[in-house]
Image (spheres, grey):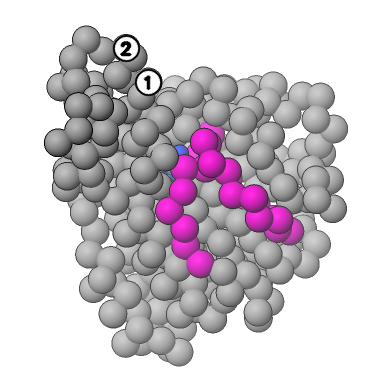
Amino acid sequence: MSDDPLKKLIAAIRASQNYGAVSQTLIESVGLSELNKRSSLKEAIKSTKNKLHQVGGAYLDQSLPYGQWIDKLRAVQGDSSRVQALCLEYMEKHASTRERLPILETFYPTLFHLLPPIRRIIDLACGLNPLALPWMPLPAGASYRAYDIYGDMTDFAGGFIHLWGMDGGGFCRDILNDPPPDEADLTLLLKAIPCLEQISKDAGKRLLDSIRSPWLIVSFPITSLGGREKGMRTHYEAHFETLTAGRGWVLQKVSFTTELVFVVRTNDGA
Ligand SMILES: C[S@@+](CC[C@H](N)C(=O)[O-])C[C@H]1O[C@@H](n2cnc3c(N)ncnc32)[C@H](O)[C@@H]1O
């Protein structure tokens, strides 16, 4: 085995059940920073796993049976109400989409009503949100590209995107250290800023700097993962205003019961 501590750390994380499918770029960047802070390889491995838990694992109930899910979805392909019933069941398994279920019927229609016709979407740090495609008012032939750090999740998301008849796909990628270069009409950055700011304080700014679409939908949670409110709506509204100050972007705030959303005209790539 190699003597390089970073290589050893990556091998240990890759061998773990929970983080084996996580993007190599993210493991490397978190691992390097933890190796610089900790006194032993063992501690650095433990704290790397803790960080990966904070930004990803904490949202998932357990390792999810994506293979079975895609088989079940394929078996009902073409019957949209049965596909939607399965999507609702699976979206329960990620804390972030679970929280959105009570508002799902109105969420995308309300937001898309504020936008011009959209054909190309990028969903950054998507989680299981591609399963909400049946609730998005999109034209036939639209394209949807979804990114997250779990390769098994993004393979599944890509499978579903195609099964739902859209172009695009699911891609395993660390959107902070390796933002996708694609141009789009709309970028979704849903509840991702507070999550990624746990890895790097300037993550919000860096993510917004990387946006390449004329329209952007950004959202924030209004309760913690444990369910507490703690004034998060006011806090994140002020935070987003600070992050966007001086960019010349036009913000429209839309407040849902479980989520604070901004529809943003960026003029980038327009
Ligand atoms: C709060 S959840 C939001 C999920 C989804 N956007 C939604 O609102 O339903 C944060 C997501 O960010 C993903 N994530 C964390 N760090 C990431 C990174 N560096 N690059 C891409 N995705 C990341 C996690 O795996 C998780 O699915």
At 69% from the left and 21% from the top, the residue drawn is 242
From the viewer's perspective, is 79 left or right of 66? Answer: right
Q: Which mark identifies residue 33?
A: 1
User: In which quarter of the view is residue 145 placed?
Assistant: bottom right
For the stretch drawn in magenta, the main secondary structure is loop
Amino acid marked by disc 1: Ser
* Residue under pointer 2: 37
Report how far apart the C-alphas of labels 1 and 2 lie in the structure: 6 Å
Where, by quadrant of the figure, is residue 52 drawn?
Answer: top left
Name the residue nearer the viewer: 18 or 217. 18
Does 247 sit left or right of 23 as displayed? right
How many neighbours does mark 1 have within 10 angstroms: few (below 14), some (14-19), or many (20 or more)?
some
Circle 1/circle 2 CB separation < 8 Å: yes
List x then y, in percent, for residue 182.
66, 55
User: Number of marks in the image?
Assistant: 2
Residue 234 % position (x, y): 59, 24
- Residue in the foreground of this view, choosing between 201 and 78: 201
Quadrant of ligand 1: it is: top left
Q: Is residue 233 visible?
A: no
Name which residue type carries label 2: Lys
Magenta stretch containing residue 171, yes or no? yes
Residue 126 image offset from top left, x and y in percent: 48, 52
Query: Which one is nearer the viewer's eye here, 75 or 28?
Result: 28
Highlighted range, magenta: 169-193
- Relative horizontal placement of residue 111, taking residue 91 as reference (left or right): right
In the image, what residue occupies the spot 62% across and 30% down? Answer: 206
Residue 52 drawn in magenta:
no
The relative height of residue 36 versus residue 161 in the rendered view (above or below) is: above
Q: Is 60 above or below relative to 43?
A: below
Q: Would you identify the image quadrant in which residue 43 lies?
A: top left
Label annotation for residue 154: none
